[in-house]
Amino acid sequence: MIREIVVYPDKRLRKVSRDVESFDTDLHKLLDDMYETMIAKKGIGLAAIQVGIEKNVLIINLSDEEGNQHKEDLLEVVNPKITHLEGSEIYQEGCLSVPGYYDDVKRAQNISVEYFDRFGTLVKDELEGLLAIAMQHEMDHLKGHLFIEKLSYLKRKKFEKEWKKKLKAGK
Ligand code: Y12
Ligand code: CO
């Protein structure tokens, strides 16, 4: 089932999500719906709060060099924790909750993460490149943060002005 994406400035995007306690069919349905929604909206990452569910759940499915996404590369991430951050890099980010806006964001280059898969099995991984960026972007959603909060004061002001104009125009 394709779920509705919560769009900025909806207050739900500021909620701090809670850990999943049961790795049950409800969780599996949420993950399946999130995947269907992300693919339908042409995204490469999605956090549960972006479909209005306050749970520490996110998915990432990067595209290959030809721009194709393969389900076997899908990461289903439950209750993630970053245990190590290293280096820094700048990447132009976008978000399905801020559709049509992209800007440069500085994040750690390499991260170590621990999380659970849909069955409750602990996964420990070291991520680099776009995967590390996507994980940090999605984990920010779980804490109620958006990438636009990382913009400079002036860029944020410009964004807010443009966004208000866009919402007023009903776009
Ligand atoms: C690097 C940086 C950020 C992420 C987080 C995941 N972000 C997305 O999946 C963004 C998707 C997105 C898709 C859009 O739609 C199309 O391109 C057709 C879009 O544009 C509009 O909605 C108009 C904006 C964002 C991962 C890795
Ligand atoms: Co996002």
Image (spheres, helix red, strand yellow):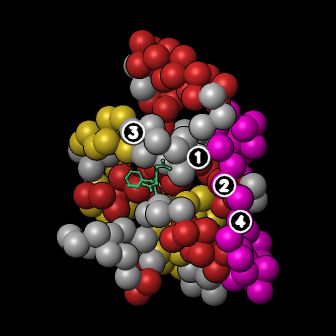
The residue to which callout 2 is attached is 5
Picture coordinates of residue 35, whole percent (x, y): 57, 74
In this rendering, is residue 14 above or below 155?
below
Does label 4 or label 1 sit earlier along the sequence? Answer: 4
Mark 1 in CB contact with mark 2 (< 8 angstroms): yes
* Residue 4, position as x, y percentages in the image: 71, 59
Give the image location of residue 82, x and y in percent: 46, 56
Which tag, 3 or 1, sits closer to the chain's start?
1
Secondary structure beneath label 3: loop
Q: Amino acid at mark 4?
A: Arg
Mark 1 / mark 2, whichever is N-terminal: 2
Q: Is mark 3 within 8 Å of ligand 1?
A: yes
Under mark 1, the amino acid is Ser
- Mark 3 Cα shell of 10 Å, populated few (<14), some (14-19), many (≥20): some
Characterize the magenta stretch by its predominant secondary structure: loop
Circle 3 is placed at which residue position? 102
Please state the extent of the stretch shown in magenta in the rendering.
Answer: 1-30
Disc 3 to disc 1, how far (Cα)? 11 Å
Asked whether the beta carbons under mark 4 and mark 2 sit within 8 Å of each other, the answer is: yes
Give me the C-alpha separation between circle 3 and circle 2: 17 Å
Q: CA distance from mark 1 to mark 2?
A: 7 Å
- Name the mark on residue 97: 1
